């Protein structure tokens, strides 16, 4: 069950990343981040209210607040790196964030078996290759490298914080608090940016249904990952959920007719092989 939930989380993250990336081509990244997170927060707040979930508030929610503060900066750094550097290098580098929850799991005493260790190694190699780094491509500047690695480890920290915050069982409330914090922090950043340049709020309003779908898919992925990490190994759940670059690449291939490099095809195959090894282990 844990593996299935983690895989579904990776699928939804891949869909959300594709949708967010496609919308970002039409409006500023900060506007996409704020509106999608605000829409997700509104949906979650309604769900928590309907289920009486507010009564489950406790000290663990501070971890959700911390995840909510980190989230907008992670997304903005990632989008900025994609804009400034070669995507075929930035995308696989960003998956290095998986090392954060894996490290947390090891610190807490988890010790994956030999078969699971092999599956993790194969899957991580596949994830890296699936980004399709190009030989002889554009050099990666120090700024792009720092932005990408910063975003990667921030994403990893968010995963670890959400998993810890939801350990008490109030997962829906945890996700709601995280997204409300995301929206509040992002709104402050958007207000500051609006003083200097247009931020595309009118275009954002027209795209609100699509932005809501992106935000809800991202939230659902976070929830599924948290559930998977509680039901099984944090390390295994982190790797399986991090298959999302494969999903994004395949969607770009099918919907945008982007050509997959041979290295991407090999990476996708290795990622699937690693998944099967993990499932068998």
Image (cartoon, helix red, strand yellow):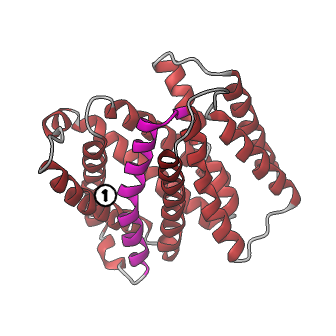
Q: Is residue 198 left or right of residue 139?
A: left
Q: Nearer the viewer, residue 227 or 112?
A: 112
Is residue 265 shown in magenta?
A: no
> What predominant SS class does the magenta segment belong to?
helix
User: Residue at label 1?
Assistant: 44
Is residue 67 shown in magenta?
A: yes
Q: Residue furthest bottom?
A: 59
Rendered view: 264 above or below 159: above
Rendered view: 197 above or below 86: below
Q: Nearer the viewer, residue 142 or 192?
A: 142
- Secondary structure category for the residue under label 1: helix
Residue 268: x and y, percent? 69, 32
- Which residue shows up at 72% across the image and 71% down it? 106
The quarter in which the N terminus is drawn is bottom right
Residue 85: x and y, percent? 48, 36
- Which residue shows up at 65% across the image and 49% down it? 240
Q: Nearer the viewer, residue 272 or 93?
A: 93
Q: Is residue 4 visible?
A: no
Q: Is residue 231 visible?
A: yes
- Which residue shows up at 76% across the image and 49% down it? 279
Q: Which residues are magenta?
A: 60-87
Q: Residue furthest right?
A: 114
Q: Quadrant of residue 189?
A: bottom left
């Amino acid at each position: 069950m844990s593996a299935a939930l983690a895989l579904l989380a990776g699928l939804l993250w891949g869909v959300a990343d594709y949708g967010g990336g496609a919308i970002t081509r039409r409006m500023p990244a900060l506007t996409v981040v704020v509106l999608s997170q605000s829409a997700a927060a509104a949906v979650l707040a309604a769900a928590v209210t309907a289920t009486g979930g507010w009564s489950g508030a406790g000290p663990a929610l501070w971890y959700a607040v911390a995840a909510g503060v980190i989230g907008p900066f992670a997304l903005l750094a990632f989008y900025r790196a994609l804009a400034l550097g070669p995507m075929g290098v930035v995308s696989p580098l960003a998956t290095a964030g998986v090392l954060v929850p894996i490290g947390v799991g090891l610190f807490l005493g988890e010790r994956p078996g030999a078969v699971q260790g092999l599956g993790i190694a194969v899957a991580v190699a596949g994830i890296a290759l699936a980004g399709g780094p190009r030989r002889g491509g554009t050099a990666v500047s120090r700024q792009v490298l720092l932005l990408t690695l910063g975003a990667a480890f921030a994403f990893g920290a968010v995963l670890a914080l959400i998993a810890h915050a939801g350990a008490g069982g109030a997962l829906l409330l945890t996700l709601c608090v995280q997204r409300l914090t995301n929206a509040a922090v992002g709104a402050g950043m958007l207000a500051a940016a609006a003083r200097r340049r247009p931020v595309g709020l009118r275009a954002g309003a027209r795209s609100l249904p699509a932005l809501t779908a992106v935000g809800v898919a991202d939230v659902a992925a976070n929830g599924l990952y948290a559930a998977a990490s509680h039901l099984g190994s944090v390390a295994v759940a982190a790797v399986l959920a991090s298959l999302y670059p494969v999903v994004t690449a395949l969607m770009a291939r099918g919907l945008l007719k982007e050509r997959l490099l041979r290295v991407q095809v090999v990476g996708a195959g290795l990622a699937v092989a690693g998944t099967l090894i993990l499932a068998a282990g």
